[in-house]
Amino acid sequence: MQPRTVSSTPPDRLQHLVDRLLVRDADAHAEAVDALAAEGDERVVPHLLEVFVIDSIATDWERFGFPAVLRERDPPRYLDLPEARWPGARDALAALADPDFDSPHAWVEWESWYSQQELEPLAGFDGWKLRLYHSYLPPVGGLLDCEPRDFDLQAIRWGNCDRSFLAALNAPDFVPGDAVSEDGSGGEYERYLAAADHVFGFEIDGTAYAVPRWVLFPHELLNAELGGVPVSLTYCTLCNAPILYDRRVEGDVLTFGSSGMLASGNKVMYDEETETLWDQHAGTPMGGPYLASHPDLFLDQFAVTQTSWSEWRAEYPDTLALDLDTGYDYDYGHYDGNVDFFEHYWHDESVVQPGVQRADGELPEKAAVYGVTEGDEVWVVPDDALAEDEVIAGVAAGREVVAIRDPTGDVAVYASPPGPVERSGDALVDGEGREWTVTRTELGGPDGATRERIPGRHGLYFAFRTHYETAHVLR
């Protein structure tokens, strides 16, 4: 990026002007914005972008509020205050930088552009950003201001939501699947699950559960105790990444929520007990008490299947399903067959998520993959590379594995029988000619031999590339 002009303004003058962006006076904001544009110093672009994003969402909540089911309600009070405005911020950015985004979604375009730049802000930017968030986004600022932290404050982006209104779905009820399936009859529960509905399926202690994506969507996270096991089903809508974590950590049971922040395009979680920040995709602490005490901790996980309700129910006729009466007073029907702009976003390589710096990789950034992890390494299987009758063999996490379609049609990774392994109808045949049956949870072989399924995680490739030290591709 080339600055429009070269500024000879003393640093204390620029610092005074960016500090004026923090006062509780929209008129003072407008004057400071105009003065910063006139000074022509690109080092204030990061400051202007931060306030431009807040201003854009605060002034157009009905378009940009998240989750979308809350757009018809009043915005959070702190966004509705008259001083939460920075008039002229977009024009100032255009005066200082090469682009001139002026669409209704200009704040997203500026964010995406900014994520590709190497811009050095004024000295003290981290402290300035914390002050901004504490004052104008208090639920976010309170979490962001943590020690220690292993993330760059400049790179952390606000995801136009926070824990005060992107509420986790806590302690929901699960009921027999036939009680909520649309092909059932009668009963006390609302029959809302259609055959083609996209569900997240999993097993806990031998019991199967199904959570429809469109019901989880406005929560992005579910905390429950199922079969005596406390779990969190976390979902990053931007990465299309459902991950089921065990909430038991070092003898404690944590309650997870969404912080409202994004790191490299992935949601940042927090736990209510310690307010530690957590990387949703990697399951690691990234700021706060657990990072201080257990910097190498990885949350344990269970395998999550993405499939249709009909496929899941065919495999698990006795499955339990989420009761639609959650008590949260959301119009879940808004997302039934409509996940807002995300379906387009997941498949459009030209759209760069704010906070994600593009890089050349083995796969397209938006490729849907399934990965298994070991520490800070991940081995991913491209979803479109695995046909129904295909087997992908390789080494992952130090052992021989095979990736196949499980009985629900989803990608699954198992410890491998002796190779080479081939598909034979619904079974596998190993290198010694022996047949192995395929279930969702394991491979069953001769004389009672088994090979376990290795729990993995779904997502778009950029989330694996940016949240693990090394990403290997199995083909």
Image (spheres, rainbow, N blue to C red):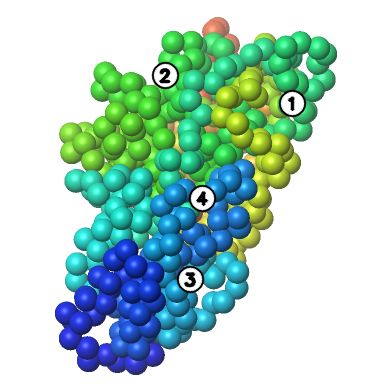
Q: Earlier in the sequence, mark 2 or mark 1?
A: 1
Can you identify the residue that label 3 sits on?
A: 110
User: Closest to the observer: 350 or 164?
Assistant: 164
What residue is shown at x 47% (from left), y 48% (from top)? 76
Q: Earlier in the sequence, mark 4 or mark 2?
A: 4
Tag 3 and tag 2, C-beta contact below 8 Å:
no
Q: Is residue 423 visible?
A: no
Question: Distance of mark 3 from mark 4, alpha carbons?
Answer: 23 Å
Residue 323 % position (x, y): 63, 20
Dot 2: element: strand
Tag 3 and tag 1, C-beta contact below 8 Å:
no
Dot 1: element: loop
Q: Quadrant of residue 268?
A: top left
Can you identify the residue that label 1 sits on?
A: 192
Residue 449 % position (x, y): 52, 12
Can you identify the residue that label 2 sits on?
A: 230
Q: Quadrant of residue 437?
A: top right
Can you identify the residue that label 4 sits on?
A: 75
Rendered position, 407 above or below 282: above
Nearer the viewer's eye, disc 3 or disc 4?
A: 4
Residue 59 % position (x, y): 52, 62
User: Closest to the observer: 315 or 133?
Assistant: 133
Label 1 packing within 10 angstroms: few (<14), some (14-19), many (20+):
some
279 to the left or right of 16: right
Dot 4: element: loop
